[in-house]
Every structure is written in structure tokens, then in C-alpha cells.
Amino acid sequence: MGGGPAACERRCRVSTVDSRALDEIKIGGMGASRRRVEDDRFIRGKGNYIDDVVLPGMLHMEILRSPLAHARIKSIDTSKAYAIPGVRLVLTGEMMATRNLAWMPTLSYDTQAVLATDKVRFQGQEVACVIADDPYLAKDGCEAIVVDYEPLPPIVNPEQALAEGSPLIRDDKENQRDNVAFDWEVGDRDGTDRAFAQADLVSEIDLHYPRSHPSPLECCGSIADFNRSTSKLTVYLTSQAPHIVRAAVSLIAELPEHMIRIISPDLGGGFGNKVPVYPGYVVSILASILLETPVKWIEDRSGNLISTGFGRDVYLHGELALRKDGRILGVRMNTVSDHGAFFADAQPSKFKIGLMHSAFACYDVPYAHLSARGVYTNKAPGGVAYRCSFRVTEAMFFQERMVQAAADDLGMDQAEFRRVNFVRDDDFPHRTPYGFLTDSGQYGKCLDVALEAVGYEDFLRQQQQARQEGRLLGIGISTMTEPLGAGNSREYDILGIKMFDSAELRVHMTGRAILRTGARTQGQGHETTWAQIVAHELGLPSADVVVEEGDTDTAPFGMGTYASRSTPVAGAAVAMAARKVRAKSRKLAAHLLEVSEEDLEWELGRFYVRSAPERGVSIQECAMAAYSNMPDGLEPGLEATAFYDPPNLTWPFAAYVCTVEIDPQTGVWDVLNFVAVDDCGVRINPMIVEGQIMGGLTEAYAMANMQFITFDSEGNCVGSNFMDYLLPTAWETPGYELHEVVTPCPHHPIGAKGVGECATVGGPAAFVNAVVNAVGEAQVRNIDMPVLPDRVYQAITQRCNVSGAPPVNND
């Protein structure tokens, strides 16, 4: 900086000018629609993704995958692969087994094959790996490997898996006698039975939330670099949870954590797909250890679609006990989830079916019971939290489809049925029928805003007129509250690790700051919004705060980013770290102003003397003093670390209303209008929130309308490329009208609730309810997602429900 001690002393002098509180919007604090700072590098093509990383002497790895869904491995011949010049190593399951690495633990306390040894259990399973000088030689090596398979009968749905005499998929597990992965239940069974005995009407419906794939634009990949001289392993990895991966690698590879560095560079999307530990990561690490050189693995698109973590694939039989006046007396939910060949869900250990029991949290229901069964099938492992908080997307879809069916059974207006059963504004905190505690909300207001915006009463009149003209109009509603920010250490852990999060804030003497967190952004805008929280707490301009994440050698330990934990947990840690810095700054300000701490007041960006407001010091002056003029007994520096263990989940609410028109001659349906009202508590950056909602609704539309990935009777994955598994573009995506209601979370440091997944969670039911409402005259109760035109046409012409459960007919 220059100038010596005298200059430093001048800079640390107390300001006697009344510098009033800063304008928070102008400094880019909370509430400012600040442009995303990370976009500067992304739109210029300067992002640093996994495939951009090149290390000296790096080799390349490719994976040989099984073409069959279920088969015994009789032999693997790798001799022709080894004969190819440039091939350095070929790894098989038997070779992995000699190092106790043929199997690895999953995040759900099951085991998963790294490379198949005894048999393959799904199409696309990893069988062998080739490491070569370039990726093309590695692919050639994979094609040269000869595997002799003995085909076995494949199982592609839970009904087949549970049938008497069905083939045992997990015959590797001791004492496994069937294809059941788990049985679990929650709720008051006896109370629910009594409620159903008192019901005037019982509404029932059977539903299937089909498999869907997060399909991030960037597939998975890793670069493992083991340094023999230091015994340190560095892994560049496409991970949403670097610290969890480091813990898992430590357990699998038997290396101490401090000798493992995980670097998660820029991620091209994640959506839950990049939470698990995949076999490719493990094999690349072993290959680097054996060859003592960096080994790079980049997954291709088909490999990603057929082998990495799926979402959904849950079947429901749901029942509602109803009074004639519309009140819900009780809920029964029976779910059967298809987990594929391995139980590899990424979810809290205590809850086998995730937070499925968060259903009906926005409704005042006295009794509920949920029973859940998980089964093994010959599919890739599923159950990742695909842009949802651990099965909450399924829970809310089932809830809102059950609510719609119940309103129809009662002959009651669907909006009024919801109003009758909503938790009232003055009934918080509210204990849900499954035991959660919701803390705040204005459910009725959100619905009213949505209905007014869509012109509900006018549309109902238009719908009746259209039916007389032979046109099919429909309106669908979805209202839901979602539990976010899992969760408090009393109940939530993954692999025994409690689900807190962390932040480390260091303010330099110039008043600029660096913030590191245990989260990992993959499009949420952490580099922008975390700085805004610091600006809100300290008055530092957000442009003066640099945010770093994703390197386990520098970031404090955290559980990563998934299940909408960013703002509810990591964001809270940022606020708490900033408050610790402010608390120390108060001591420095008291020293500079020669008063006691109790004599000071705080306004954004400065402390001032209560009795003489014109006497004050800025937060930047406090920062300089922390390095140059600290009082006796106070250690130098201005930094703090905070670990935030949330006292409860946060509960944002949303009301979504969709109107559609169906062409009865083709089954094609178009969205006429979509209104979204979200109450996510305090909004840090309104522009980013709106982007998250629009993106979430687009994913919801895709699930409801076009994303179709399924299996035929042989276990072949249908939809293993983007020609078949359709992603919405700007051409297909409808427009959305967004509104907001703000009910601050009472226990979150800044009142935020989170929003990144709400639209994906609540949106699908609004689309499907609208289509089913449009064809209601045909007595159609359900059309499984995706609601493809041929399914709608079948429902209209055959006046029947339409199932989309596999196996699909390829004829």
C-alpha cells in the first residue's frame, strides 16, 4: 500500500463526518437484482469445466458397459485390448477385487459394483475400463474386449420384482431372499383407520411418477492425479458435494482425508445427478495410483443417461377419507419405489423413501399413514434428489393429484376444496399429520393471487362454452409447501455425517473480502448472492466480496449443494460468519472511538456513538484497524468461520395454476396460461429467484409433456439420447406469469426459505391436473406422465385411464 506507519495511522483515524447508512440496493445487498458475476466468464467461454483441465502426462480412460440388463459373466478376454499400441492398462472386476475395490458403499448403506464381477444387473453397467494415451485409443480398447455373457431374465418394474419365483437380482448379498430393498412406514396407522371408518366418502387413485433423468448439459467426469512422492491424491471431479466425495474416497481407497484433495471446477449443471460417487471416479483413482500419472475420464451422453442417477420411478396407491363438506379426515399413501440394481439414493439415512411424508403439509389433516417399499430391478440405480428435497417432488405430485381426484369425487370446486383444507395463517407453527413442524405461510393469499391473475371464474365460464363447441379447455391447480434445508443434526445425516453447512469470511485490511463455503454452485448464482448477504450484514459493497467454493483444501467442510440446501443452510452460515465479523468490528470501533461497545449503534456500513451520531467509523476503517490498530487483548485480523446447524426445515409455499387446450383429433395440448405465485420468504436477489422459478417450471413442463425414458421387456433403456429423451427448448417452452408473496421464515437468520426447486416440485401436477380436467367429461381419472399426445388421444377416444409403466412395447 505504501506510505509507512504514518500513512497507516492517518487512514485509521476516526471519521467525524456523519456518513449515514448506506443504500443497500446501491451496494448490491439483499433485495438488489444484481447481475450474476459468474456469467462474465461463462458467456465469454472462459468457464473452467472438467474437460478444460489438462495435466502433464495425462492419460485417458473409457468404460466398457454391458449391453444386457441381466446376465452372468462367464469370461472377459482383454488380450486384444492390450495389444493396441498406446493402451496402458485394462481393469476388470476381478482385478478390482484383488484390491478390495470391486464393490463400494452407496449413500444409502447398500453396496454397488464398481466393475461387475459375477454378473451385470442393468444395461450400461460398468464391466471394464481401458486407460490409454488418448480417448480414441481407449475407446478402441473397449471395443476390443470380448465378454461372454449368459443372459438371465430381466426385471423392469416392481410388479415383476415382487412376483413369486422372480429372479433374485442381488444374489451377491448375504441373506437376501427376494428383491425387496426395504420396508418403511410413518404416521398414525390406528388413527388413520379410525378416520377412514368415519368418512362419508373415500377417494382413491393409482399413480406412477415415471423415471426421469436430470440430464445436465455437462456429463460426469474426473481427473485423478496421485503423486507418489507426496502420497497425495488430487481429484478434479464433477461433484455437487466435494467434501462428501472426499470422505467416501477415503473410505473406499483407504487413504487419509488430509491426503485427498477434491476440486470441483465449474459445473455444467447438476440437478442431483452429480451427488453420488460413480464407478468411473473410483476406477480413475485406482488407475492413477497404479500408473502414477493423471488419468482423465469424461462420460459420454448415452453413458450418462443409461447409468447415472435417475430420479422418481415411484408407484402410489393413495386414499383420502372425506367429509361431505370437503374436509379431509385422513390420508393413506402406499408407495412402491423402483431403485434399480442398487439402493444408491442420496438422502438422509433415517428416511428410506426420503421426505415422501412431507405430503399434505399445507393441509390441516388430522391423521395420515404412509407405507413404503423399495425394490431392486434391472435398471440403473435411481432415487437421486433430482431438483427436489429428497422425494418431495413425488410427494407433492401425488398429493396434488389426490387432491384433484378428491375434489372431483365430491363434485366440489378444486380451488374451494383446497381453501377448506388449508392450514390457516394463525395456526403456525403447525404439526403436519406425518410429524413435521411448519413455521409460517399465507397459503390462502397465494392461491387468491394466482386465481385472480389467471381469471379463474372467467375461465370456468369459457370452459363451459368451449365444451358446447366441441373444444377441450382445462384448468389445473397445484398448491404445496416443500421442506427445504435438510437438516437439523438430531434427525438428518448422510453416511452418519450431520447435515450442517459452513462459511469462512476473511476481510482484508483494505475492506475487501473473500468468502469460502462448503456448498458448491452449479448454476444457482452463489458467487453473486453470497456476496449480497455479506453486503447486507456488513455494508461492504458486494463487488468487494469474492466467493470461492469447491476445493476441499481451502473450503470449510460442508455437505454440498442439493435438495435446495443452499440458502436455507449455507446461506445462513454466510450470514452467521458475517455477524461474527461484525461483532469483532464492534470491539474495534469502540477502541477507535474511545467508547464502550454498549455506547455504539450499528447502521449499514458503520458504527456510531449513540449520543453523538456524527461520530462514527466505517466497516472498512474497522478492517484496517484489525491489522494496524487493535486494542490490547484482541487478536489481529478480521475473519470468522461459522457452522450452521438448522433448527428446523424451511417451508416455502407455491400456488401454480395452468390452463390448457387440447386438440381432440390429435391429443396435442397447448398451455394457454401459467401463473406462479411463490412465497420463498425474503428474496436475496429477485432476478435470480425469478430465473430459478422459470427454469424450474420449464423442467416441470418437460416432465409433464415430453421427457420419456423407459425400458422394454428385455431391459433396454428407451430414451438414452436426446433424440428420444426430449429437452425443452425456447420453441416449446410456454410463458409464465410470476407473482410473489413474502412470509419471512422465523428461524432463518435472514428470513429466507429457498426457492431453487419449488417450481420443479409443484409444477408437474398443475400441468397434469389441467389436462385431466380438460378430458374430465370422458370420465378419465389419470394419464401418466409424460402426458404424450397419443396417451391423451387414447384417454379421449377409449374413455380410460392411461398407464405409462414399463415395459414399453417397441413394436
Image: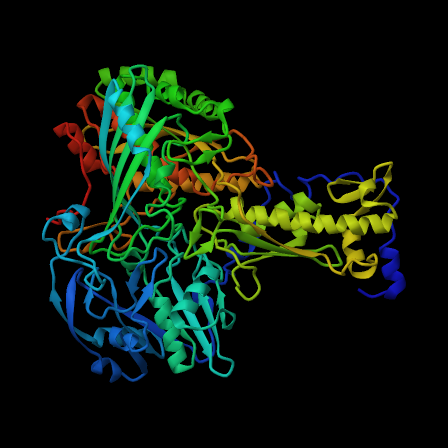
In the depicted view, which residue is nearer to us: 295 or 150?
150
Colour mapping used in the image: rainbow
Q: Residue at x 32, y 40 (%)?
A: 394
Kindly tell me whether residue 684 is visible in this rendering: yes
Q: Nearer the viewer, residue 398 or 583?
A: 583
* In the image, residue 135 above or below residue 768: below
On the image, the x and y values in percent for residue 502 come to 56, 54
Q: Nearer the viewer, residue 580 or 125?
A: 580
Q: How many marks?
A: 0
> Going by the image, does 38 lie left or right of 290?
right
Quick check: 71 left or right of 646? Answer: left
Q: Is residue 498 left or right of residue 354?
A: right
Q: Quadrant of the N terminus?
A: bottom right
Residue shown at the point (87%, 61%) measured from the top left: 7
Hey, which quadrant is residue 94 in on the image?
A: bottom left
Q: Residue at x 18, y 35 (%)?
A: 802
* Spot occupied by residue 486 in the image (x, y as percentages of width and height): 46, 46
Against 33, is 304 above or below? below
Pinpoint residue 118: horizontal percent, then vertical percent: 19, 69
Residue 701 horizontal/vertical position (percent): 34, 38
Horizontal relation, residue 432 to residue 85: left or right: right
- Taking the view exactly as shown, the residue that stands out farthest to the front is 190
Q: Is residue 585 above or below residue 367?
A: below
Q: Is residue 732 visible?
A: no
